[in-house]
Image (spheres, rainbow, N blue to C red):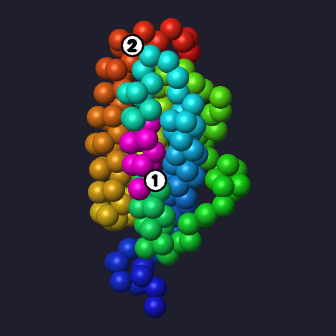
Amino acid sequence: MKTLDYLHLDESAAGKLVRSLQQLLADFQVHYMNLRGFHWNIQGHGFFVLHSKFEEMYDDTAEKVDQIAERILMLGGVPSNKFSEYLKIAKVREIDGVSCGGEALGHVLDTYKYLIGRERELLAQASEAGDEVTVSMMTDYLQEQEKTVWMLCAFSAHKHGDSCAR
């Protein structure tokens, strides 16, 4: 027996959702590692605030990675667990060597801009497939990330003495 047999979802539509969720999983995995790097390497005036914020963000991202992988399984797919596979399909690019708060925040905001766009596409796709659970998951992600973007933009407006250019 397959889980999908009980969910009243079209198998073809579920397969398309799985492919989209695999893409999102890869993007979130790379985003997670970027956030870890920012957390580890951040320096300067905003260190205490940003060090803690990046930790909060990567913990949240790790939870989302697990949720996405589990949704893939529920829809009859198998989530990839190889970083080499993530790097092949991820649109979020690895970031290395960033220690400046302003630069790190710029990268995070760029990533959220991309993720929010992908999640909106996935939400529409899930809605068309009648998959209210994935719709709800994407809606929750969007609500949280829009607020995070707003807060990061508000924080960045003052630059807190950060003289790094992006």
Q: Which residue is mark 2?
A: 160
- The secondary element bearing badge 2 is classed as helix
**Looking at numbered disc 2 in the image, what kind of residue is underneath it?**
His
Give the numbered dot on residue 17. Answer: none
Evaluate whether residue 17 shows in this view: no
Residue 30 is left or right of residue 162, and the answer is: right
Residue 98 is left or right of residue 160, and the answer is: right
Q: Nearest to the eye among marks 2 and 1: give it.
A: 2
- Kindly report the distance in space between the C-alpha atoms of the residues bearing marks 2 and 1: 28 Å
How would you rate the neighbour count of disc 2 (Cα within 10 Å): few for under 14, some for 14-19, many for 20 or more? few
Q: Which residue is mark 1?
A: 62
104, above or below 23, in the image: above
Residue sitting at x 57%, y 44%: 33
Magenta residue span:
54-63
Residue 109 is left or right of residue 88, and the answer is: left
- Residue 106 in percent (x, y) is at 49, 24
- Residue 11 in percent (x, y) is at 47, 75
Residue sitting at x 42%, y 49%: 59
Magenta span dominant secondary structure? helix
Q: Earlier in the sequence, mark 2 or mark 1?
A: 1
Q: Say if the magenta span includes residue 57.
A: yes
Residue sitting at x 53%, y 41%: 36
Question: Which image quarter: residue 98?
Answer: top right
